[in-house]
Amino acid sequence: MRVAIVHDFLVQMGGAEKVVEALHALYPDAPIYTSVYDPAVMPPEYRAWDIRTSSLQRWPMRRKLHRLMLPFYPAAFESFDLSGYDLVLSSSSAFAKGVITQPHTRHVCYMHAPMRYVWMTDTYLKGERAARAGFALRVIFHYLRLWDQVSASRVDTYIANSTAVQQRIARFYRRDAVVIPPPVDTSRFTLCERRGEYYIAVSRFVPYKRMDMAVEALTRLGLPLKVVGTGRQAADLRRKAGPNVEFLGWVPNERLPELISGARAFLMPGEEDFGIAPVEANACGRPVIAYGAGGALDSQIDQTTGILFRPQTVDALCEAVERCETMTFDHKAIAANARRFDTEQFKTRVQGLIACP
């Protein structure tokens, strides 16, 4: 069976790229088709893979011109010749699912989320950024919504990474999806049963992640917080932070297990499509304090693996943290919960779905 893997972009590491790595482990001879690829920011092992890029790869400063390139991504993916493959596995949160396949080819799409910026524009951009989004950008989003709906019909089988994404696929595309959570390498993390010394939050600094809530809540409470990540909100977050908040910037993957295992609890104040980082925290035996929506409802068990809070406000997060300060958690039970999402479980589930006609 000839297999091809398709992915939106290879220009940063995240949960979606971990899915690509797991799919490539299942089919190591499969070429990977993507719009653009930056070897300088991806793991070195990617350079040994058969990665095939679109014409957008030739654009100068393509990482900085990402938004200007938006109207051109659909054509880039439609231009790939996938006629020689029996199975196409797309990993998509935007455009990869829009590839054109032949009638004899089965197209299975692992959907991280329907395009947030076209279906949930105000939530994705948040506040003043949504207000500043000009007429031209909204016209582009309208065009992309139409293309997204049309291209959704090209997929034979959808896999959703969470129940929340499964519901969005049904709402926006009118399609069914099987839920298979993304892979988490739980073996990287060691169980720690002692109470941690600080709270930790790990995320990109973009509005919908709501890192501002974590900073404001822990500043108000005066409890120690370590913040891992970078992004366009960095300066604003630092202005809001008290002396108890420490910004660590970008942290290499090999340092994260030790940092997370020393935490009292992991904070996830934003609504995630799934959220791999909190499951990694669970693998260390760390409880997670998460906004009770989206992927957290699949990965976390309230009062067992942590605390789910609502509404999505600083006051509610403060109350959840204060509750955490008084609670005792079974760290072994928390780590056992994480193993439900191990990489080997992901591979087994995907193989089982592909084996079904």
Image: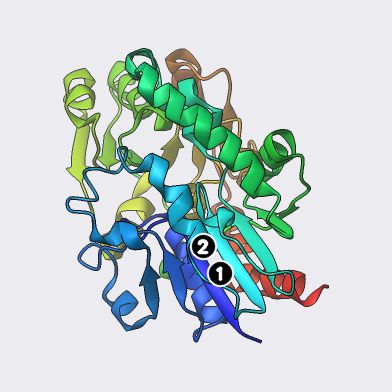
Residue 182 can be seen, yes or no: yes
Q: Residue at x 34, y 58 (%)?
A: 13
Residue 295 can be seen, yes or no: no
Q: Please report whichever mark, 1 or 2, sits nearer to the chain's N-terminal start.
A: 2
Residue that mark 1 sits on: 343
Q: Which mark is residue 184?
A: 2
Estimate the spatial distance between the alpha carbons at disc 1 and disc 2, rounded to whole Å: 5 Å
Q: Residue at x 74, y 75 (%)?
A: 104
Q: Are marks 1 and 2 in contact (CB under 8 Å)?
A: yes
Name the foreground residue: 170 vs 338.
170
What kind of colouring is applied to the model shown?
A: rainbow
Compared to 312, does 284 lie above or below? below
Q: Quadrant of residue 199?
A: top left
Residue 202 position within the rendered picture, expressed as x and y whole percent measured from the top left = 35, 44
Which quarter of the rendering shows the C terminus?
bottom right
Name the foreground residue: 61 vs 357.
61
State the SS at label 2.
loop
Amino acid identity at mark 2: Val
